[in-house]
Image (cartoon, grey):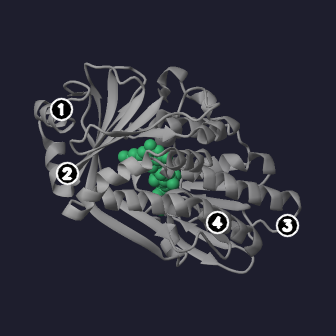
């Protein structure tokens, strides 16, 4: 074998997994389509990631947290969910012992940069940047991957972390339920007049969903607007003044008039649930395994959890001189991670269906459901579910 593990994809999940194997002495090759320069200094992609406390702890253990400027970590003190024109808000606050924070928001590019920086100096890791995969073969003892430069690499285990539209997943013959929602998200940082007080606002209006996520500056937020794809495409092309007017109107000026600080970023929405997270000699992690709808802000958190679950099992197998790509190791990961991901994936799907359905029955049911969700036991259940990831 040329190495022990081949990881395809150097996004947050792939880098976190590779870093999670640092204590194992396994030789890892990570294949990433983008250049090394793009990995080291990722471009801003507009995403602000709401990190749970567990995820922040995982990033600390991986040595990535120290590479994030603390002044750029925005504390999230509470979240409020609103429905249409109703003044009632479902509010979530921090659980006891969480330092008064529900979580924290950090830009995706900063997280990617920090995870890459954490892997620097990891001698067991060889990053093949600027390379793709052209072929994949498996045998009972291992995998062989052919790269775009015609290099062939053999390993005992292959890990796919190459996004929700994973080509590796398709090459492995793993089916996935992919749901293209016909909607897009427009994401843009804005300046506003009223301070956000560290509160994330999400409101489901009729025909639109709009969220305001607090940034480190009290007068800046990230606006996330979801509309049908053609409407978002038109808005993304609009002049800054028109975009400002439209966002202020659509947010009912809750934070005062909004002024965009950059061009918007657009993400067409698709959710993905892979039928299997493992196959002989291979495993899927991150969005390649589960592509969550961003509305509940859990894809990144789940990706870190899955990477940690697999890294722990692979490290344990290596320490006991076992086969790191054995079916028992991979099945153990698959079972554990499916159990963790399934409730969140299902709950997110149910929220999206209910709050984006503009038929009269759904509109009538929404206020009652929002009030029911505000009952203490339900909120405690949600907090417990979030605290697990
Ligand atoms: C607008 C938006 C907001 C979000 N907000 C949140 C949030 O608040 N909280 C949260 O937890 N999650 C959030 N998410 C989800 C989160 O961004 C993703 O779950 C996370 O980035 C997935 O990481 P990943 O490493 O699995 O995949 P990606 O980030 O997609 O990385 C995949 C990597 O693989 C590389 N690659 C792809 N194909 C190949 C190939 N064939 N060969 C080699 N390399 C390849 C790509 O270049 C890339 O570097 C949000 C997503 C969006 C779109």
Q: Percent from the top left, x then y, of residue 248?
A: 18, 32
* Disc 3 crowd, CA 10 A, few/some/many (<14, 14-19, 20+): few
Q: Which residue is nearer to you in this view: 231 or 211?
A: 211
Q: Are marks 2 and 3 in contact (CB under 8 Å)?
A: no
Q: Which mark is residue 248?
A: 1
Q: CA distance from mark 1 to mark 2?
A: 16 Å
Residue 322 has which mark? 3
Answer with mark 1 or mark 2, whichever residue precedes in sequence. Answer: 2
Quadrant location of the N terminus in the rendered image:
bottom right
**On the image, numbered disc 4 is attached to which residue?**
158
How far separated are the C-alphas under marks 1 and 3? 59 Å
Q: Is residue 114 left or right of residue 97?
A: left
Give the label on residue 7, or none. Answer: none
Q: CA distance from mark 4 to mark 1?
A: 47 Å
Which residue is the site of mark 2?
A: 206
Horizontal and vertical percent position of residue 10: 54, 50
CA gap, disc 2 to disc 3?
A: 55 Å
Write the residue at 43% across / 72% down: 177
In front here: 104 or 39?
104
Q: Nearer the viewer, residue 63 or 229?
A: 229
Q: Earlier in the sequence, mark 1 or mark 3?
A: 1
**N-terminal label among 4 and 2:** 4
Q: Which mark is first along the chain, 3 or 2?
A: 2
Check mark 3 vs ligand 1: CB closer than 8 Å? yes or no: no
Q: Report the residue at 82% width, 62% height from top.
A: 317
């Amino acid at each position: 074998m040329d190495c022990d593990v081949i990881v395809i994809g150097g996004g947050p999940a792939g880098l976190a997994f590779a870093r999670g194997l640092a204590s194992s002495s396994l030789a890892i090759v990570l294949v990433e389509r983008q250049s090394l320069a793009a990995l080291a200094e990722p471009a801003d992609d507009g995403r602000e990631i709401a990190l749970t406390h567990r995820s922040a702890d995982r990033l600390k253990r991986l040595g990535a947290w120290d590479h994030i400027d603390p002044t750029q970590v925005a504390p999230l003190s509470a979240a409020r969910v609103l429905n249409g024109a109703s003044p009632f808000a479902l509010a979530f606050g921090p659980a006891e012992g969480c330092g008064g924070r529900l979580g924290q928001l950090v830009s995706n590019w900063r997280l990617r940069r920090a995870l890459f920086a954490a892997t620097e100096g990891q001698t067991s890791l060889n990053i093949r940047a600027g390379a793709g995969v052209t072929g994949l073969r498996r045998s009972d003892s291992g995998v062989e991957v052919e790269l775009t430069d015609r290099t062939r690499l053999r390993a005992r285990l292959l890990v796919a972390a190459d996004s929700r539209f994973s080509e590796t997943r398709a090459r492995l013959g793993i089916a996935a339920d992919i749901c293209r929602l016909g909607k897009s998200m427009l994401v843009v940082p804005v300046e506003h007049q009223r301070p956000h007080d560290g509160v994330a606002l999400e409101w489901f209006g009729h025909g639109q969903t709009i969220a305001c996520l607090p940034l480190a500056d009290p007068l800046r937020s990230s606006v996330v607007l979801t509309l049908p794809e053609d409407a978002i495409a038109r808005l993304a092309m609009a002049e800054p003044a028109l975009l400002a007017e439209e966002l202020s109107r659509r947010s009912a000026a809750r934070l005062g008039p909004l002024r965009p600080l950059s061009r918007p970023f657009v993400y067409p929405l698709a959710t993905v649930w892979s039928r299997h997270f493992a196959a002989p000699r291979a495993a899927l992690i991150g969005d390649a395994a589960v592509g969550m709808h961003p509305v509940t802000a859990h894809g990144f958190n789940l990706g870190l959890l899955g990477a940690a679950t697999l890294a722990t099992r692979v490290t344990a197998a290596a320490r006991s001189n076992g086969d790191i790509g054995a079916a028992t190791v991979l099945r153990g990961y698959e079972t554990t991670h499916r159990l963790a991901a399934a409730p969140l994936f299902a709950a997110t799907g149910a929220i999206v269906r209910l709050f984006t359905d503009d038929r009269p029955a759904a509109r009538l049911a929404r206020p009652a459901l929002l009030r029911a969700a505000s009952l203490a036991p339900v909120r405690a259940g949600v907090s417990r579910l979030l605290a697990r990831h």
